[in-house]
Image (cartoon, coloured by chain):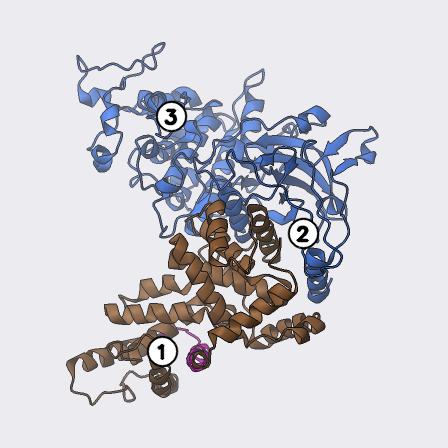
Chain colours: A blue, B brown
Amino acid sequence: MDPITHLHNNVRAYYGTRDPGPAAQLIFRDKNLGHSHQYTILDSDHQLTVVHPDPNDRGSRGGYQSKVKVMDKYRVVGFISSGTYGRVYKAHGRQGQPGDFAIKKFKPDKEGEQIQYTGISQSAIREMALCSELRHDNVIRLIEIILEDKCIFMVFEYAEHDLLQIIHHHTQQPRHSIPPSTVKSIMFQLLNGCQYLHSNWVLHRDLKPANIMVTSSGHVKIGDLGLARLFYKPLHSLFSGDKVVVTIWYRAPELLLGSRHYTPAIDLWAVGCIFAELLSLRPIFKGEEAKMDKKTVPFQRNQMQKIVEIMGMPTKERWPLLTSMPEYSNLSTLTPMMLPGHPHHPHHHHHHKSSAAASTSHLEKWYYGTIGGHASTSSPASNGSLTSLGAEGYRLLAGLLEYDPEKRLTAEKALHHPFFGGSGSGMGAGASTEQISRNCFEGLKTAYPTRRVSQDDNDIRTSSLPGTKRSGLPDDSLVGRPVKRLKDA
Amino acid sequence: MAANFWESTQRRNWQFSKDELAQMREKLEESEQSLVQMFPLPQRRHLSIYFNQQLNRLGKRLGVRQQALATAQIYLKRFYCKVEIRRTNPYLVIATALYLACKMEECPQHIRLVVSEARSLWPDSLTLDISRLGECEFFMISEMHSQLIVHQPYRTLTSLQSDFFLSQDESNLAVSIVNDHYMTDLPLLYPPHIIALTAILLALVLRPNSPGGTATTMAAATAAALAQAQAQVTSRTNNGSNNGQNVPGASDKDRQQEARVTKVQRYAAFLTESAIDIEEMVDCTQELISFYECHEQYNDKITREQINRFVKARGLDKP
């Protein structure tokens, strides 16, 4: 369609239409599946109010109508997941578009029986704007955004896997570690995506295995930019906008200690946690989240405790700004050593242990314990074993899990780490003997199971499950007060 | 990309040539011939002045920062490239642009507050509720294809002011020139750094200490400066040297004047060494001068009446 016709149609769509529009509820049947599953894109209780414009008043609005209909263009084949934002569906193109798609539908705020325009949440605005702008091999690609029937549909390229699912697969009997070449490729691609985001002044703020997608061809794609935002000279401090960022297990110590001004380093801490999880198949710092009080953000004692147990107590020698952290005083209430069985015992441990011992990091022990080798006996092992990751693997991990955000590796530096062959040019560059593949599945004999796509009608209709921890910002949504019904003209 | 202007959606999709822009607008008016004939409107820059004033009034009530106001201006411009003005209630569009820009610039305003302030600001021209603003937001985002990240000249201005040793007065003047450029087509024509550099040039060759600042006095001063600025630019392109032969006021004994001359020389040297498109800067300068002249003929009353006339006649003020 040429732009003018396009424009024309649109103007007509917005103002001129008398068409009451499609059925109030978008239900469609997937004939191709051969059974009669119904997929409801709008929740059953989200009836649309159709506004009939007064025929005598041409200037009156017929209501906003999208010129692209999501159902005309895509055929939903199943439900993938839900979160606080809404739901994600798997879809095929109806107009010959190649490949599969993931359609993220933002849930509109419910207002009684009908849905109303209430203003789009800030996190949706951020995600829409950033995804429209960003283009990188290691960042999930947005196809288009359709604003239709008071809902936002973000159409993404489909990724068959995600790191959570891959990690989970390896925990299945017999438990077997992720091949080192896969770990390397994943880490390199993840850091590459991170580096792109950071060089574009984008903080992701919610990196975790579930948000790292992997395509069937082994390309790693950073997904879910729902918490991401630009950090170039913000008008307000980042803290003032979102009190709580990053899912608790991946949250950097400076955030746990209440830092007001955080940096891309928070994403690198999360990358460090993900690296550790790829090695051990379980979250390295699996703390319990303290519930948010009415307004104050509590000190996440248990989470900090988990970190301290492996990393040792942070000291102002290693982290000069430590003492100026708002929650600094809470640190002394933590138990510094690894105490199996009593992980969170919040009383003081002045006796016996010197502060030097308390601050000793056990990360190296953790690392070699996990990869099944020893620092002292780091003989080159077979390629199939994690021991082949060797001492450089430990150094990279330690560089990412560095307490002081200023000393922590940046994405750029991490990409140049000797772990990846030292050349830094990485992927396909001849400098390293052991090349890092763009396909993290390269050389693997077995395929990972495909993403579970639910075709259960009930699943689609149930209200959204708790998902990602979202921002504490009220997001302009209406709280409490019902809106007046949209009057018929 | 969010940081790289050259790969941004702004560069790729929202920067036009003058011809392209004229054609788009012509087609838009052609598609609505009867409306256009029935409801004459003042020239576009006068409309822009009026919209800018209204936006600033709303922004002031809400305590919105200039950066968000600037982004809202860009949204207005982009939107009206795609939609004929007479088909919309401009007050609704202004309120929506500001509401959206505040979210994008990370200084969000509650929708209910925007609605209530807009209502009390334009009681006769707009019946507004949350759902109407929310609906217009969908319309606006859709027209802009969700391309909401805007690169503003302020960033270049801030990063260059120390390089050029701008005084506070000069900086302020440059900022106010950038503020004014939103009332022209320049944001749709040139990259933000060209705008910023032009603003700096004008701030340097103008006299920041003279009773300037207002559009009226600036118009005259800028017109005088234009010749100098162009000579300056031309001399750089021609010989690439840095002898400052055409620097205005070089004979002036005044120390301040000398300091400014040095700054202009430094600036000229920067221009010659950089790959800045000087043609664009010249055109940018002319557009600004012409805008300040056109500002003199601006009639607030007529503009307001003409806008309100189609809003009322077409029932666009009603829900």
Q: Is residue B138 magenta?
A: no
Please report the bounds of the magenta region as a residue range. B272-293
Give the percent coordinates (x, y) of residue A265.
36, 40
The chain containing the residue under callout 3 comes to A
* Residue A481 to residue A21: above or below: above
Work out whether B260 lies above or below A409. below
Quarter of the image where one finds residue A167: top right
Q: Are marks 1 and 3 on the same chain?
A: no
**Where is residue B289 shown, x and y percent of the image?**
42, 81
Q: Chain of mark 1?
A: B
Horizontal relation, residue B146 to residue B183: left or right: right
Where does label 1 land, which residue?
B272
- Disc marking residue A63: 2
Pair 3/2: label in front: 2
Tell me, yes or no, whether dots 1 and 2 are on the same chain: no
Q: Is residue B273 magenta?
A: yes
Q: Are there few (<14), some (14-19), or many (20+) residues within 10 Å of tag 1?
A: some
> Element type at marker 3?
loop
Q: Amino acid at mark 2?
A: Gly
- The numbered mark, 3 or 2, whose residue comes first in the sequence reads 2
Q: Which mark is residue A293?
A: 3
Please rate how many residues cluster around mark 3, counting C-alpha atoms within 10 Å: few if below 14, some from 14 to 19, many from 20: few
Asked whether the residues under marks 3 and 2 belong to the same chain, the reply is: yes
Q: Give the answer, above or below, for where A407 lies relative to A339.
A: below
Give the SS element for disc 1: helix
Residue A381 visible within the image:
no
Counting from the top left corner in percent of width and height, residue A231 is at 39, 48
Q: Main secondary structure of the magenta part?
A: helix
Q: Name the chain under label 2.
A: A
